[in-house]
Amino acid sequence: MAPRLRRYGTALAALTVVAAAAGLLVGESEVVRSAAWTAFGLAALLASLFAVRLLFRLARRLATKALWRVRHRMTALFFFVGVLPISSAALIAAAGLLVVLGPVTVYVSLTDLLHYTDRLRAAAHPLRLQIANSAPAERRRAASSFAARASADFPGLVVLTEFDGVVESHPRLELPRGIPTDAEASPLASIGGTIYLTAESGSAPAGGRVIVAVPFTPGLLTDLLPGLGVLQVPGGAAPVSLTATPSQQYALDLLVRWPVESLVHNWDTGETEQSIYVLQTRPSAVWERILSRQTQLTRSLLPFMAYTLLGFFAASLLVSILIAAWLARTLTRSVNDLYQGTRHVNRGDFRYRIPIRGTDQVSDLARSFNAMTASLERLVEESKRRQYLEAELEIAREVQSQLFPSGPPGVPGIEVLGVCRPASTVSGDFYDYVRLSGGRLAVCFGDVAGKGISAALVMASLHSILRTEAASLHFEDSASMQRSAARAVSRANSQLFEATSPEKFSTLFFGAYDAATGALAYTNAGHLPPVLLRNGSAQPLDIHGMIVGAFPFADYSAGTVQLRRGDLLVAFTDGLTEPENASGEEYGEERLLAAVRAAASRSPKQLIEHVMDQVTAWSGGAGQSDDMTMMVMRKV
């Protein structure tokens, strides 16, 4: 329950307890009784508010649950926008038609009664003239003769005359008060307990007058108002049906009742009384009465027009319902497809595709969703491949790290250390030093063309070849050392060419060092010349041939350098000289040698770290574009 409802419940419980406690003491005093009734009232009010609030929340929760689906929302929308207004309009139209039928029925009925009254008046007028021009002895005979002749047209006709103060009736009626002077106050007159429809001609006492009256009987009403039921409601008495109600012609031919208030002049008492008649009819009867006065063509045309309009309305309503249902189904089905698609994607099923069902905007949304899932599927596949490659590269990096020397060679009189900082996971640069028998040492240093895994594979192959060649080195003097170094590079070139494609090649520096003599015999195959620092001066070593692996029969020579105590030999790759700063200026060999001189007194490890940090600072901390590899040999 929500906090607000809990507060309502707590307050209601507290008031209930107070009211109950006050109720126990209700007989104590007037103050206690007043407080008890107040507590009861507040508790009832709060209970009502609590119930309304709870019902509102329940209704909102049910509506939210019921309208969760878009299809239900669309159904509710079409109901409130289409079905409800049309139904309301139809009900209003039906109610309006029923309401209109009442006054129309009254109008038609009164019109017929007025016509009948006009006929009576038209018959009374010549009779008054005839009686007025007749001798007193002839007046009675003229009135009786007229009553006998006119009774065929006016059943139950009564003729009342008043000439020279003499009142007569034919046939005879008891008139205790005579003929009222205001006899035309109402066309309905009560004479001797019978209701008559009257019409007067002339006025008394000046010229005399004649009043004709016809009993207001069910037979008269049936003749005047065919197909119309008349119900009389006397004051304080049960209703009396004067005529039969018209029969029902079809299912919607409902009975329509409309009250008519009429004044009845009571000649016996001289008072005017109210009488209520209820007209009962059906739409079919009213329609028949209206059409009965039209031509045959009109009577045939009007039903045809009515049925045509009704058919057009029904057809339009049916088409509208079908189109609305189709649109709702199309939209809700598309939304449901998208919902199912999002559920599949949420489960990681990026292969799921939404069916395309049309060419509208929702279908384009489905196409976009399918394109998105296809892109996600490709991204996931690429991510998996990338992870696989990264795992493979990590394995390659670990393998490659095992190719580099794990520590200094431990040859007396010389310090040797190499460091490689790859630009990516694996490197195409390499260095190695292999301790030989007799205090001798083989060193190699190089840079394979290219980057990444292909360069690393070539580097591993070349590293294996050089290890084999280093293990087979055999020399006794300086000349044999040079020949051995040149021969090792030549064999490495031939084997690398055979093992790789022509575009896979490498630069190579290979040397053999004899600790007993301090001589270093070397062959530089296209690599950047290592630099010998002696007493502050820098001397680059020679280059003795082209790169290895590009040509099968390349010729290589060798040279020898005598290392003295304090000499520092530095070998490096172009990853230390080619980095550029923000202005596009390369670091270069001059700055590299300056950095080496600045840290020459440090240990080999500190010296290499100092130089590489200087290069990184020069490039502004940007990522490496190439491998940085450096090897230092110091004579001690």
Image (spheres, helix red, strand yellow):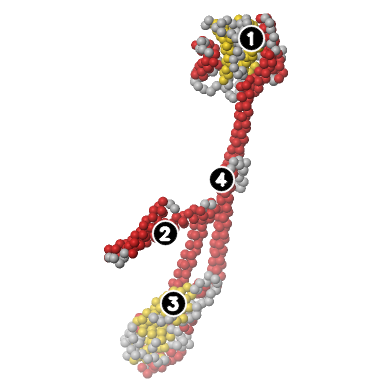
Q: What's the amino acid at mark 1?
A: Gly
Residue 138 in the image: above or below residue 118: below
Front residue of 16 and 607: 16
Front residue of 440 and 274: 440
Q: Is residue 297 visible?
A: no
Mark 1 against mark 3, which lies toward the viewer? 1
Element at label 2: helix
Q: Which mark is residue 439?
A: 1
In primary-sequence order, the first of circles 1 and 3 is 3
Q: Residue furthest bottom?
A: 137
Residue tagged by mark 2? Answer: 51
Residue tagged by mark 4? Answer: 361
Residue tagged by mark 3? Answer: 278
Element at label 3: strand
Element at label 4: helix
Q: Residues within 10 Å of mark 3 (few under 14, many from 20)?
A: many
Residue name at image x 33 percent, y 64 percent: 24
In primary-sequence order, the first of circles 2 and 4 is 2
In primary-sequence order, the first of circles 1 and 4 is 4
Q: Where's residue 254, x and y in %?
A: 50, 72
CA separation in Å, label 2 and label 3: 47 Å
Mark 2 against mark 3, which lies toward the viewer? 2
In primary-sequence order, the first of circles 2 and 3 is 2
